[in-house]
Amino acid sequence: MISLKRNSKKQLVEATGIRTRKSSIYNPGQSENFKISRSKFDDFLKCKKCFYLDRVKGFESPQIPQFKLNELTDKLFKKEFDLCREKRIPHRLFKNNNLEHLIPFKHKDLEKWRDSLHYGLMAKYKTTNIILTGGVDDVLINKKNDKLVVVDYKSQVKKKEELNTKSYLEDVYHQGYKTQLEFYSFLFKEMGFEVDQFGYFIVCNGSDETNEFNGIMKFDELIIPYELDDSWIPKKIDEMIKIINSKKIPSSNESCMNCAYARQRNEL
Ligand code: SF4
């Protein structure tokens, strides 16, 4: 994919490959606090080398364009959930699935928790200088046990027969989604909240079962429950912190097409 660098006014500028904001670059052994987001943790899980080059060496990865249609469905779901939050009632999808005891959670910091760019959920990890962050889509509360329920909105296009919990959770491309919910669960616990055993993906699936477009796109909606297990996370975070405090660049992921492409190009 060809990615051209543009400034905030959308003008083309020189791409140097290195970020200029020093606070986003970690100096191994530093004592100042340093934020690592859920998406950077996900990068670490996929490729330790890329994570290191990004966070420690300040390499700037090519940007992919934002998916505005996904953003829109998220925004519309948020509006619906916020209305239910105000009325203290369950969202229609939860009501229709006999989950009316799960209602949108009201909290003064909710908008901050949702703002992944500036705030997000935030927790200092053990006695380290690392602050873990992550912007959650939504949070419900289970009225039966007063525990928080983490929720993520997802948009997709899949065949109707694949619209079930088993297919959704077994899809190799959805494994990162599970990590996402488990990371939020972990962060909430670190922040002192109790978290319910199940989180939920709220999925809207674009349907192609119409003969005409006419400016109307139809969606099927479903909720996918996922039993969370965040017990593996601290071990990986410890590993991640060890790596950014090292001067040694870790090895790459041999399945990565970007690295393979760069290798082939260098050989020319
Ligand atoms: S294999 Fe190479 S390009 Fe791919 S994620 Fe790792 S360092 Fe980055």
Image: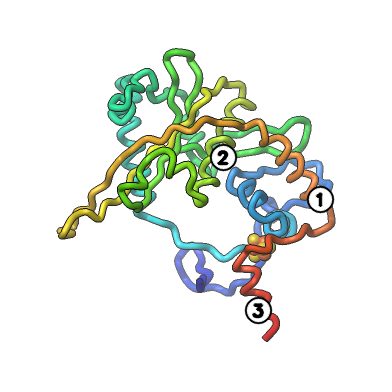
Which residue is most to the top?
A: 144
Identity of the residue drawn at 47% across and 30% down: 110
- Residue holding disc 1: 28
| Image marks 3 and 1: residues in contact by CB distance under 8 Å | no
Identity of the residue drawn at 48% across and 48% down: 171
Compared to residue 32, the image places residue 147 above or below, namely above
Using the rendered image of the protein, determine whether residue 58 is visible from the camera's viewpoint: no
Q: Residues within 10 Å of mark 3 (few under 14, many from 20)?
A: few
Identity of the residue drawn at 35% across and 44% down: 163
Question: Under tag 2, what secondary structure?
Answer: strand
Looking at the picture, which amino acid does disc 2 mark? Answer: Gly
Q: Residues within 10 Å of mark 1 (few under 14, many from 20)?
A: some
Q: CA distance from mark 3 to mark 2?
A: 36 Å
Compared to residue 160, the image places residue 199 above or below, namely above
Query: Does any atom of ligand 1 lie closer than 8 Å to the CB of label 1?
Result: no
Estimate the x, y position of residue 128 in percent, counting from the top left.
77, 35
Task: Name the N-terminal-most of marks 3 and 1.
Answer: 1
Image quadrant holding the C terminus, namely: bottom right
- Residue holding disc 2: 134
Disc on res. 180: none
Q: CA distance from mark 2 to mark 1?
A: 23 Å
Looking at the picture, which amino acid does disc 3 mark? Answer: Gln
Q: From the viewer's side, name the closer residue of 54 and 33.
A: 54
Q: From the viewer's side, name the closer residue of 107 and 200.
A: 200
Q: CA distance from mark 3 to mark 1?
A: 31 Å
- Residue holding disc 3: 264
